[in-house]
Image: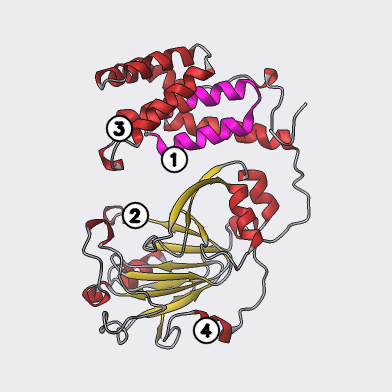
Amino acid sequence: MSSPTTNVVAAESWGLLETPTMDAETPTLLQAITEHGGYAYVSMASLAAAGDLGAAEAAREMAWEQLHSGPWHSVLPVWRDAYSMACLHVARLHFSKGELTEALRVLDMGLIMGGTLLRKDLDSAVEKVSAKARHATGISEQRAKRKLVREDELDEEEVLCSLPVKSLSLKLVEKRPALSLEGFLREHFLSGSPVIISDCMAHWPARTKWNDMDYLRRVAGERTVPVEVGKNYLCPEWKQELISFSQFLARIEANDSSLAAPTYLAQHPLFDQVVGRKYIRLYPASLSEELYPYTETMLKNSSQVDLDNIDERLFPKVHDLEFQDCILEEGEMLYIPPKWWHFVRSLTTSFSVSFWWSDSKI
């Protein structure tokens, strides 16, 4: 029988997690790890393949330490793949015992922190474990929907009081219904001008499903997600956490205004508003100098200016800069041209999707 608290189920009839890529690549990967001094890891990985959970966890910890041995860009790709391998071994053993929640958590860590070599195995394993977990919990899909965001009208005065000065008082981003691809390329992409496309998302199932709290918990509640906590990454109190998607939804439901640090799912040329509303302000790339970007390499695409509290002594050019802004409604897409500066504020709880592409694919 299943346990609703630990999500442990009888697994004999469910088979094992299949890892065809790992099975094929193991000799080559272990040889590469050995060449980089990972003798202990190879020993533990061999025991893990034989069914030793303790050895699998030890191998995962060894790879984890390598991932944190220096800046992320300096970590050898072989150690990222080693972490993926260890996660697959750990998850496979938890799955064989019916420990679905733990298996899924480990697989997500492999996806978040691991390399690309074993990505296909991780993806297929997540799909299988997630399906079994949903079956085990037995959550009905016929329950009444609990909406994430109500369809209340925004109070215009209240909204304006919460936004930076001059908001919605200058040039609004152009809104275009029924914009063809040819028209988008000719009138906005090539000219580098933003635009809101207002009627391209009506057919998206996410428009309704992502506003259903029970649906979100059912399909992704046990998944591990990276979140950002704090006003933005420039604030000293900003941090990142790894939590379950159910925990993230619980923070949204709590809607605790006493919390000084809002929580966001971590990670614009095309910015699609699926649920809720956002205020967005755009400054053209030609005004980069007047927006006082940081000089440090890692922050050079971030402005030092706090639009909520502009220090005109330090940033005298900002107040008179021209910009375009808008309130992005549900079902609208916003095109943000390359290198344009953007300021975003949620007006309600919201979910958005960003699409990126390179010029060569257009």
Q: Secondary structure at mark 4?
A: helix
Q: Are marks 4 and 3 in contact (CB under 8 Å)?
A: no
Q: Which mark is residue 77?
A: 3
Badge 2 is on which residue? Answer: 357
Badge 4 is on which residue? Answer: 161
Q: Residue at x 55, y 70 (%)?
A: 277
Q: Earlier in the sequence, mark 4 or mark 3?
A: 3
Badge 1 is on which residue? Answer: 112
Say whether residue 219 is visible.
yes
Q: Is residue 222 left or right of residue 302?
A: right
Structural distance between the alpha carbons of marks 1 and 2 = 22 Å
Report the front residue among 260 and 277.
260
How many numbered markers are drawn? 4
Q: Earlier in the sequence, mark 4 or mark 1?
A: 1
- In this view, the mark in front (1 or 2): 1
- In this view, the mark in front (3 or 2): 3
Q: Residue at x 35, y 80 (%)?
A: 310
Q: Earlier in the sequence, mark 1 or mark 3?
A: 3
Q: Secondary structure at mark 1?
A: helix
Structural distance between the alpha carbons of marks 2 and 4 = 36 Å
Q: Secondary structure at mark 2?
A: loop
- Quadrant in the picture for residue 115: top left
Q: Earlier in the sequence, mark 3 or mark 2?
A: 3
Q: Is residue 64 above or below residue 96?
A: below
Q: Are marks 1 and 3 in contact (CB under 8 Å)?
A: no
Structural distance between the alpha carbons of marks 1 and 3 = 14 Å
Q: Position of residue 25 (x, y in %)?
A: 37, 20
Structural distance between the alpha carbons of marks 4 and 1 = 38 Å
Q: Position of residue 233 (x, y in %)?
A: 39, 60
